[in-house]
Image (cartoon, helix red, strand yellow):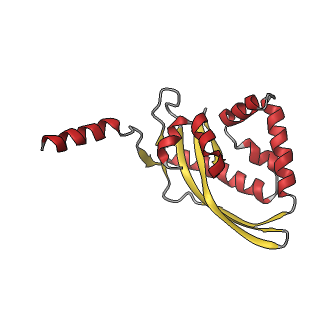
Amino acid sequence: MHRLIASLAILICTTSTALARPLWSAELMSLDAVVQRFIDDIEQKDMAGVVNVVPARIINHYSGIMEMSPDQFRNLMVAQMSETMRPVTIQFIKIELMGLDVTEAKTAVDEGVLFARLPYSMQMTLNGKEVQASSALIALFEDNEWGLIRIEPNQITLLIEIYPFLKDVGL
């Protein structure tokens, strides 16, 4: 019996204190506005708009690695994404917000940063072929604004380096 109690105590002490909760109405409205703008920008191939929803912390991190200013890095991203999207026609994109829970980061560096996982699906035509993609975005509320990050398997390590609290959320 003592082992069971000790095991439970250890589990409770080592479990993250970050708890999921439903989005408040104002949070949901502001996130919905960002998501709608992002969808419109994708559909219109406005890559400057798409890049604008990338959180500043990520832009600053990558621009530092590339040894360029954040504005230069944004411009490079816009140019590369525009070229990549040139042969693509978007049929639809859907980002799910229904029943969404948000979690607050509980680390010293990230206290108050909210995050949520947003499932999305997209259908597009590329070189005459229909392509369907499903994945997730991470929505981050930081510095009083929502940002969106698409979860790419080859970028998870870097995302965790920039946002260490994401390590425990199962990207």
The image shows a total of numbered marks equal to: 0
Q: In this rendered view, identify the residue nearer to me: 134 or 32.
A: 134
- Residue 131 placement, left or right of 18: right
Q: Residue at x 80, y 73 (%)?
A: 129
Residue 11 percent location from the top left of the image: 29, 41
Q: In the displayed structure, would residue 54 be above or below residue 86?
A: above
Q: In the displayed structure, would residue 130 be above or below residue 114?
A: below
Q: Residue at x 78, y 47 (%)?
A: 49
Residue 81 percent location from the top left of the image: 81, 50
Residue found at the far left of this picture: 1
Task: Note whether residue 165 is visible.
Answer: yes
Residue 88 percent location from the top left of the image: 82, 63
Q: Quarter of the image holding residue 14?
A: top left
- Residue 154 placement, left or right of 86: left
Q: In this rendered view, identify the residue nearer to me: 74 or 154.
A: 154
Task: Note whether residue 23 is visible.
Answer: no
- Residue 74 placement, left or right of 162: right
- Residue 161 placement, left or right of 108: right
Q: Residue at x 85, y 51 (%)?
A: 82
Residue 122 percent location from the top left of the image: 69, 64
Q: In the displayed structure, would residue 160 be above or below residue 95?
A: above
